[in-house]
Image (cartoon, rainbow, N blue to C red):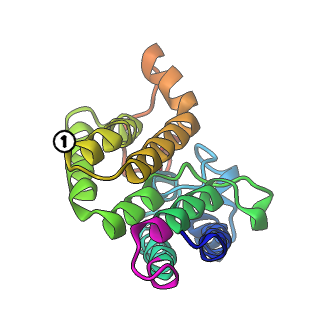
């Protein structure tokens, strides 16, 4: 394992991840998404506050970030999965704790999906399917996100990935679920907001 190349992948991933798409897009609308709705700098809050066009922009930009950083990780570490995983993990960390926005970002679900698409599309599609089913049945975006991430290390193990991959999935799951801790409390209390396409909604999500 080339430590220097992994460090470069991590730094690049963190800096690109710190370019929080939700915050940047909201500034185009002369707002700071962190002061609107649920105050979360993520896709669901953008959808509720700014509408579908803004949400699509955030969706595409966040997916692109994960593709770029994990792709560089592959290139630097000569197609080894570890380089992509390190770059991807730090992209998620940058998204959640962006250095350019006072370390206040989103919750990392969409970025995690893009990382999974680049490292094992099977887990990404299984997780996306679980997310869609749960949100479709309950309209709780947070519950769908948490469940999909919680199960990702299990799927990595079932698909016979090496320990580093499984541990990486476990870390991403733990980090993103921790960022949803307020949602978990509201889910348990029955006060969590459900998905709505009205701009006045103020639930939390990705």
Residue 4 location in percent, x, y? 67, 75
Task: Tell me if residue 83 is in the magenta stretch.
Answer: yes
Q: Residue at x 21, y 41 (%)?
A: 136
Q: Is residue 50 magenta?
A: no
114, 203: nearer the viewer: 114
Give above or below for 69 relative to 33.
below
Residue 16 visible from this viewpoint: yes
**Disc 1 secondary structure class:** helix
Residue at 64%, 51% in the rendered image? 36
Q: Position of residue 172 (x, y in %)?
A: 48, 47
Q: Residue at x 32, y 44 (%)?
A: 152
In this picture, is 66 found above or below 102?
Answer: below
Q: Is residue 131 visible?
A: no
Please tell me which residue is depicted at 38% across the width and 59% down the height of the picture.
113
Q: Main secondary structure of the magenta part?
A: helix
Pinpoint residue 194: horizontal percent, then vertical percent.
Answer: 38, 35
Start-end of magenta stretch: 74-84
Q: Is residue 25 left or right of residue 119?
A: right
Of residue 140 and residue 52, the one placed in the foreground of this image is: 140
Q: Name the residue nearer the viewer: 184 or 17.
A: 17
């Amino acid at each position: 394992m080339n430590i220097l190349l992994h460090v470069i992948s991590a730094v690049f991933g963190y800096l690109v991840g710190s370019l929080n798409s939700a915050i940047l897009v909201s500034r185009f609308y002369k707002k700071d998404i962190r002061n609107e709705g649920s105050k979360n700098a993520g896709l669901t809050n953008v959808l509720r506050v700014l509408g579908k066009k803004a949400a699509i922009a955030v969706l595409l930009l966040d997916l692109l970030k994960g593709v770029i950083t994990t792709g560089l990780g592959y290139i630097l570490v000569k197609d080894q999965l570890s380089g992509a995983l390190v770059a991807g993990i730090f992209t998620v960390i940058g998204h959640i704790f962006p250095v350019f926005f006072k370390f206040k970002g989103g919750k990392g679900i969409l970025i995690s999906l893009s990382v999974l698409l680049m490292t094992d599309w099977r887990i990404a599609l299984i997780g996306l399917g679980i997310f869609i089913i749960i949100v479709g049945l309950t309209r709780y975006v947070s519950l769908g996100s948490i469940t999909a991430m919680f199960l990702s290390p299990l799927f990595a193990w079932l698909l016979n990935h090496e320990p580093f991959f499984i541990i990486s999935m476990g870390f991403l799951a733990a980090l993103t679920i921790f960022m949803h801790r307020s949602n978990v409390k509201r889910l348990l209390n029955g006060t969590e907001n459900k998905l709505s396409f009205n701009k006045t909604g103020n639930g939390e999500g990705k």
